Amino acid sequence: QLQLQESGPGLVKPSETLSLTCTVSGGSISSSSYYWGWIRQPPGKGLEWIGSIYYSGSTYYNPSLKSRVTISVDTSKNQFSLKMSSVTAADTAVYYCARQVGPAEDFDYWGQGTLVTVSS
Amino acid sequence: QSVLTQPPSASGTPGQRVTISCSGSSSNIGSNYVYWYQQLPGTAPKLLIYRNNQRPSGVPDRFSGSKSGTSASLAISGLRSEDEADYYCATWDDSLSGVVFGGGTKLTVL
C-alpha cells in the first residue's frame, strides 16, 4: 500500500523560506506516468494546488505561487520536496503531498498533512 | 474566489439523495475531466470520483458523478451519517495550465 508522509518545520518566520519533504513508501517515486504534487489548505478554508513534479524533474506550478515555489525530487531517497520563499501569515496552512495519476489527472493517494504556521 | 463554484453547504436526512454542483467554464470543466474529493473532519482529502464518473475501488456505488457542458455534479444516494464531510470538485484549467479546486461544499446529515 502506497504511503506518503510530509515532514518539516511546523513554524516558519515571516519572510523566510518554508521547506517540506514528502517521503514515499510502498512504491517507487520513479514509476512512469505518476506525478507528485503539493496541495495546501489554510485553516477553515478550501484546497489550493501548489504544484507537481515528475520523477524526471519536470515541474508545473500554480501561476499565483510560481514566483515563490520550487519543487524538487530525489529519486535515491524516494522523496520530493517543496520550498516556498518569502512566506507571510497567508501561507499558514496544512500542506499535503499526494500522488497524481497524470499531469492533469486526479490525486489518488494523499499524505496525512502537516500544519505550517507562519509567525514571528 | 475559486475558479470552480460550489454551494458552500448542502444537507439531507438519512436515506435521502443529495446532489452537489460544481460550475466552471469552457477552459476547465468544459474541456477536461472532473474529480471529486471527500474530506472527513480532521483528515486528508480522499478521491471519491475520477474522470467525471468513475469510482475508485472501495468507494460505494451510492456515490456517482456526472458532467454536462461546463458543470458537474456529485450525487449521494441513501445518505448516511458518515457521509457528513466537505466535498471538493477539481479539474485542470487550460488557461491557467494548472489544477483548480472548487471552494468546497459542507454536507450536513440532519
Image: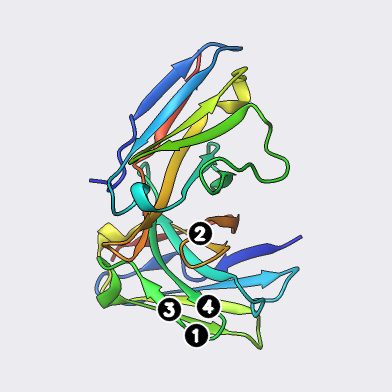
Name the residue carrying label 2.
A105
- Direction from residue A118 to residue B39 in the image, left or right: right
Badge 4 crowding class, 10 Å Cα cut-off, few under 14, some 14 to 19, many 20 or more, is many
Residue type (three-letter) at the residue carrying disc 2: Glu
Q: Which label sits on residue A57? A: 1
Q: Label 3 near label 1: C-beta < 8 Å? A: yes
Could you tell me which chain the residue with mark 1 belongs to? A
Instruction: Name the residue located 59 percent from the left edge and 12 percent from the top edge.
Output: B14
Q: Which label sits on residue A54? A: 4
3D distance between C-alphas at marks 3 and 4: 6 Å
Could you tell me which chain the residue with mark 3 belongs to? A
Instruction: Name the residue located 63 percent from the left edge and 41 percent from the top edge.
Output: B55
Camera-near label (2 vs 4) is 2
3D distance between C-alphas at marks 4 and 1: 5 Å
Q: Are marks 4 and 1 on the same chain?
A: yes
Q: Secondary structure at mark 2?
A: loop
Tell me if residue A42 can be seen: no
Instruction: Name the residue located 55 percent from the left edge and 37 percent from the top edge.
Output: B40
Camera-near label (2 vs 3) is 2
